[in-house]
Amino acid sequence: MPAARTNVAVVGYGYWGSKHVRVLSSLADVSVTVVDGNEDRLAEAAHHYPAARLAGSLDAVVEDVDAVVVATPPAAHTLVALVALEAGKPTLVEKPLATSVAEAELLVETAESRGVPLMVGHTFEYNAAVRTLRDIVRSGSLGRVLYIDTARLSLGRYQRDVNVIWDLAPHDISIVSYLLDEMPSSTSVWAQCNIGDRHADVAYLRLQFPRSDAHAFVHVSWLNPDKVRRVTVVGERKMVVYDDMSDNERIRIYDIGVDPAEVDDPSSAHAMPVTYRSGDITSPFIPFDEPLRVQDQHFVDCVRSGATPATTGRRGLDIVRVLSATDRARLDGGVVPVDDGPVAITEPAPATVIVEQRSPVLS
Ligand SMILES: NC(=O)c1ccc[n+]([C@@H]2O[C@H](COP(=O)([O-])OP(=O)(O)OC[C@H]3O[C@@H](n4cnc5c(N)ncnc54)[C@H](O)[C@@H]3O)[C@@H](O)[C@H]2O)c1
């Protein structure tokens, strides 16, 4: 039973881990232990959070904390999370849960066999706009969802250990499967490595959702001039655009649509095989609450109450299965099923995928 004050170790004080430390430090009755293998990062943490305890490795402090947040680069998630889970500490692992299905399964099995809560940081499932969008989709007001299009683009942070799909698409796969309440059954992928020779930095995924009879098209890029964070849901009756970059109209509902029509006079120059419906564009009010704060508060609440988190380790494993399928789809060049067994994460050989090498423009 945790003490009244909950001590959370955040492992990895980098770009995202520092945000966890900021958010957790602001929560009531939470104290933070910052763990990082890099002394410069610890010095930075000490400067901003003089009250925080510091450590160079999780092993040194794991017995003294109530819970652990893993915010290291993805390739280190499994080893760090195993230290936490084997010590019986509720653990929140950043997305993606792990870099292979086998490692994600190991984490889930370790957590479940020991009865330790395992949560994954699918932050967008704690985003009020995404929750509103899900309510709209589930209300049926859009009619049948025909397809969903997502774009997550910017001049992004090139990662060392994963490609752009494993880095960014966990968010979009989590959003579309949350909206449709279903995991995709198969995927096909087009991806390209433009800068350097290591990882794909631009990719398009096509995900099939059999029960909904819908598709999602996911575009992710580290190589785009402006920042785009957009989800478009096209329904038979209405359409919705969720633009996470918008200040005050993050969700716009378009009462528009297209119906097939009989062409009476095919010889007419203006005859069209469809008719258009157009109506209002409305935007519901969505109060802003930082999604990471909502997520970390939920994690702390689960640590204190013993409740099962909304985004469990199993949900993280489901997303890793889709990511793993994208690796196979790149090798295969066609449509591959998602649940076709574990495969370690590897970059396909250049000869087997469409890869155009260009001169590096970023150092
Ligand atoms: N949920 C989100 O919206 C979101 C956004 C960005 C990043 N992330 C995730 O957060 C994680 C961290 O990403 P980042 O961009 O902050 O990485 P980063 O490279 O900026 O920081 C990683 C930090 O971890 C430290 N580290 C590495 N291995 C360690 C170990 N074994 N023990 C202790 N410290 C270790 C490094 O010294 C570094 O300070 C990734 O899993 C990433 O996918 C999530």
Image (cartoon, rainbow, N blue to C red):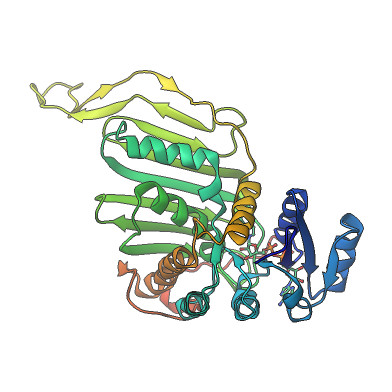
Residue 62 percent coordinates (x, y): 73, 76
Residue 138 vs 71, above or below: the answer is above
| Vertical comparison of 51 with 101: above or below | above
Q: In this rendering, would 54 be left or right of 352?
A: right
- In this view, the residue in front, 10 or 7, is 7
Asked which quadrant contains residue 329, the reply is bottom left
Q: Is residue 261 above or below residue 221?
A: above
Residue at x 34% of width, y 59% of height: 184
Q: Is residue 304 left or right of residue 172?
A: right
Q: Position of residue 148 (x, y in %)?
A: 37, 45
Most distant residue in the left direction: 264
Is there any visible trace of residue 193 in the rendered image? no
Residue at the image position 40 percent from the left and 37 percent from the top: 135
Could you tell me which quadrant the N terminus lies in? bottom right
Name of the residue lying farthest toward the top: 279
Specify whether residue 178 is in view: yes
**158 or 138, which is in the foreground?**
138
- Image quadrant occupied by the C terminus: bottom right
Q: How many marks?
A: 0
Front residue of 253 and 194? 253
Residue at 61% x, 68% y is 91
Give percent across and percent down for residue 58: 74, 77
Ligand 1, what quadrant? bottom right
In the rendering, at what x and y percent does residue 36 appear? 78, 71
